[in-house]
Amino acid sequence: MTQVSKRFLQKQVEDRIINLLSTSLTSISNKAKLNIFLDDLLTPTEKLMIGKRLAIAFMLRKGYDYPTINSILKVTDTTIWNIKTTLHHRGKGYIAVLDDIIQQEKWAKLWENIDHFITKSMPPRSGTNWKEVRRKQWEKRRSQQKPF
């Protein structure tokens, strides 16, 4: 677990540090830069810990139950409960970000379904092995599925 010094900072210094972190994160314009920044800023354990918290909140938001979250993410019920409590009592930030992600997923799924419908309804070119084409389409859809 991450350790924080027992010596308290002045409120003004603490606010400046948090502001610096927020400004740094919001100034990053693409995913590649963000990944490089997070690699420099956080240890692998810290990144995993934060990622699991976000994944727990995401799964709770999507309606997953404790045993499912526990088996997929390998976290305790206490950790899930803590994130659930945060979501219910002061989780405005979690909710705003997660709802945006869920909305983006819904749009992506809609376009994927439209593409699948068009692909399935149109026959392959003449002389094409239909069975092979359908197998490749199925494999493509299968590879695009997310674990949760």
Image (tube, rainbow, N blue to C red):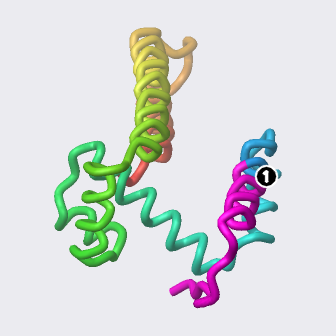
Up the image or down, 142 lies above or below 113; here it is below
Name the residue: 62% across, 81% down.
Answer: 8
Residue 16 counted in the magenta span: yes
Q: Position of residue 68 (x, y in %)?
A: 21, 62
User: Is residue 7 on the magenta stretch?
Assistant: yes
| Left or right placement of residue 112 versus residue 87 in this view | right
At horizontal 73% and vertical 43% (from top left) the residue drawn is 26
Q: Is residue 13 above or below residue 101?
A: below
Q: Using the image as rendered, state which of residue 57 and residue 89 is in the foreground.
A: 89
Q: Is residue 49 left or right of residue 88?
A: right
Q: In the rendering, at what x and y percent does residue 117 appear?
A: 40, 15
Q: Secondary structure at mark 1?
A: helix
Identify residue type, mark 1. Answer: Ser
Residue identifier under label 1: 24
Residue 141: percent from left, percent from top: 45, 37
First to last magenta residue range = 1-22
The answer to whether residue 117 of the structure is visible from this angle is: yes
Name the residue nearer the viewer: 27 or 123: 27
Give whichever of 4, 138 is nearer the camera.
4
The picture quadrant where one finds residue 105 is top left
Above or below: residue 8 compared with residue 91 = below
